[in-house]
Amino acid sequence: METNGENLASSLSSSQTNVEIVVVPEPIEQIPAAASSDVESEHDYDECIPCFRTLCDYFSLSSFVYIYLAASVVCFYYIRLQISGDKTNGVLDAFYFTFILMTSVGYGDLIPSSTLSLLFAILFAILGMLLIGAMYGLLAEMLLVAQEAIMSDEEGEETNKLKNKCLRQHLVLYFGIHMGVGIPVMVSIEKLDLVQAFYCINATLISVGSDNCFSTKSGRIFALFWIPQGVFIITFMLFIFTELYTQRRQASLVKMALERIMTPQDLEVADLDGDGDVVLAEYILYMLNEMEKLRRQDIEPIIEEYQRLDVSTIELLTSDGGNQASLSEPLQTFYRTIPIPSLDRKRKLADYFPWRQTSSDLLKIITILSIYLGAGTACFYLARHHISGEKTNSILDALFFTMVLTTSVGYGDLSPNGTLAVLLSSLFSLLGMGVIALVLSMGVYALVKQPLGKFWRKTTTSRNRTHSNKVGNQIIVIVILFLVHMAVGTAILVSIEDLDFIHAFYCISITITSAGSHKCFSTKHGRVLALSWILLGTIYKGYVLFIFTELYTQRTHRHSGDETTTITTTHADLVVADLDGDGVIVPAEYILLKLKQKGKFREKDVEPIIEKFQTLDVDKTGKLSLRNRTSQELSLYNARLI
C-alpha cells in the first residue's frame, strides 16, 4: 500500500499530478473545466486588481494631503501675526509650521501664542496624525504581502536572509546620507555648531525637537524636504523591524508545533468532521494552524466555493462509479460545527488580546523599556546641570525628560543646552525609537496573523454585517477614549499647572499628536501627571494607527476574497483534491489543496508533518482512530520523537 504521505506529497506538488489510482468520469457540467492557461490568465488578471485599487487609494489619499496642506497653509498664513517665534516669509513659515504639525516634530522656532492659533494647531495636528495613520494603512498592504510571503516561506530561508541583509544595508546607507548631508547643510545655513546641527537633524528622524533649529529662510526650505525624508527613514526602519520580528516568530512557532507533545485531546481537536478518525488532511490542517500559517481570509473563499459545488459531483469521484456515500447531510452541518484547533475550547480573557501568544516577547520589551528608562534617568540626572528649563525635582525631571524622548513628545519645559546633554538626548531618542519599533512590530505581527475564528458559522451577509458592526464599535471606542483622555487631562492640568482651558487642552492634545513646543508641565505634580498621560497618549496614538491599518487591510482582503470566489473549479482540481484516493473528497482535503494552490504553504512545510503522522499511524491505515488511540500509545509515540 502506498503511504498517504507519499500520495499527499505528490498531490501537493502540482495541480496536474498523476491520478492513476482513481477512475475519473467525464467532466460534469456544473463545474467549468477551464484550461489551465485560462485559469492562469484569470489569476494574473486578479493579481492586478489589488495593485490598481492600491494605486487609486494612493491618489485619493494624495488628494486629501493636498487639501490638508492647502487649508492649513491658508489658515496659518491668515493668523501669522498670532504665531510667535523666528519668522522669515509668511507663506514659507505657514508651510513649515504645517509640516511640523503633520509629522509630529515639535520644534520651538514657531509657537502659537493666541487662542485661535492654539485651536488651529490642535485641529491640524490631529488631522495630520489621522493622515499619517491613513498613509501607514496604505503602506501596510506592501508590508502584509511581505509578511505573508514569510508565513508561507515562498522565497526560501536563504533568499530571506539575503533580502534582510540588503534591507539592513539600505537602512544604514539612507541613515548615513540623511545625517551626512543634513549636518553640513545645517552648519552652513543655520550657523550651528556640529553638535547642535547633529541634534537638529536627529530630530527630523525621531520627531523630538524643542530647540530653534530652522530659523532662516534657506533652512526652512531645506526642512520642507528633510523632515519628510526623516519620516520615510523611520517608516523603512519599522518595516525592517517587523520583517525580522515576524521571521523569528514564525520559525519559533514551527519549531514548537513540530516538537509539541501530542495528547488524545489534541487529536480530538484535529478531528474536524467529528467522525472519530483523523485523516492526513485533517492532521495537516491542524498542524498548519498551530504554526499560524492559516488565516480567516484564506479559508473563507475556499469554504464558499466548496459549498457552491454540487454534492453529486463529489460523490461521483469513486473508483467504480458506484457505491457512492451521500455527503449532503454532513455538508449541511459540517461548516456550522467544524472545530479549528484550539478555538472551540473555553477562551480566557488573555485570548482576546492581539499579543496573547507573545507573552515572552512582551516581557522582554517591558524589561528593555525598564532598563532604558532607568539608564536614561541616571544619565540625565548626572547631566542635569546641562539641561535648561523649568526644574522641580532632579530625579523626576530626569525621568520626565527621558519619557519625552521615548514618546517623541517635544515639550519645551526642558531643553539640552550643553554638548553632553545634546549627545545624550540624541542617543536616548534613537534608542527610544528602537523600543517603540519593537512594540509596533508586535502590533503589525498581530495584524498579519489575526487568528482563525468560527467564521464558518456566518453567511456572507452576516459576515459583512459583523464587519460593519466591528468597524462602528472601533470608531466609537476611539472617540470615547479621545474624549476621556482630553477631558480628564485638561481638567487636571488646569488645576495643577494654573493654565487656562485652551492652553491646557493644547498641552493634553500634544500627548497624542506628539507635536508640541510649549511649556506644559512645569510643576512637580504636573510632571507626575505627565509621566502617565504622555504614555497613555502614545498608546492611544498607536491604537489609532493600528485601527487605521487594520481597517484598510480588512477592506483590501475582503475585496480580494470576493474576487477569489469567482474563480472556477475544474474537474481535474477535484480529482487532485482526493488526497488519500478513497474516491470521496472530504472538506479538509479540498481546503488543503486550495491553500497549496494559493501558495499559503510549501511542500517542505508539510514534509515533517507527514513524518509525524506516519509515525503516529502505527497500524498504517492512513488515519488515526480516536476510539483505539490510547494515552499509552501516544506516550510511546512521543517518546520515539524525543
Image (cartoon, grey):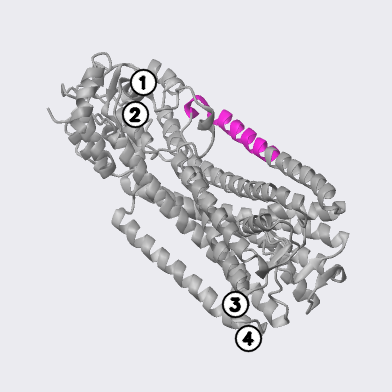
Residue annotated with mark 1: 273
Point out residue 435 in the picture as x, y percentages from the top left corner: 52, 54
Give the Cα distance between marks 1 and 2: 9 Å
Point out residue 244 in the picture as x, y percentages from the top left corner: 41, 54
460 inside magenta stretch: yes
Q: Amino acid at mark 3?
A: Val
Q: Which mark is residue 437?
A: none
Please name the residue shown 48% across and 27% down the image. 454
Relative side of 169 to 216, left or right: left
The quadrant in which the N terminus is found is top left
Q: Are marks 4 and 2 in contact (CB under 8 Å)?
A: no
Circle 3 Cα neighbour tier, 10 Å, few/some/many (<14 / 14–19 / ≥20): some
Q: Amino acid at mark 2?
A: Ala
* In the rendered image, the vertical position of residue 227 relative to residue 559, given as above or below: below
Of label 1 and label 2, which has the lower sequence position?
A: 1
- Given this view, does label 2 or label 3 mark the residue nearer the observer? 3
* In the rendered image, the vertical position of residue 605 relative to residue 504, given as above or below: above
Residue 36: tell me if it is visible: yes
Residue annotated with mark 3: 195
Residue furthest to the bottom: 188
Relative side of 119 to 9, left or right: right
* In the rendered image, the vertical position of residue 443 relative to residue 462, given as above or below: below
Name which quarter of the figure residue 223 lies in. bottom right
Q: Are marks 1 and 2 in contact (CB under 8 Å)?
A: yes
Point out residue 213 in the picture as x, y percentages from the top left corner: 68, 75
Number of callouts: 4
Give the Cα distance between marks 4 and 3: 13 Å
Q: Which mark is residue 188?
A: 4
Circle 1 Cα neighbour tier, 10 Å, few/some/many (<14 / 14–19 / ≥20): many
Give the Cα distance between marks 1 and 4: 73 Å
Give the Cα distance between marks 4 and 2: 68 Å
Give the Cα distance between marks 3 and 1: 68 Å
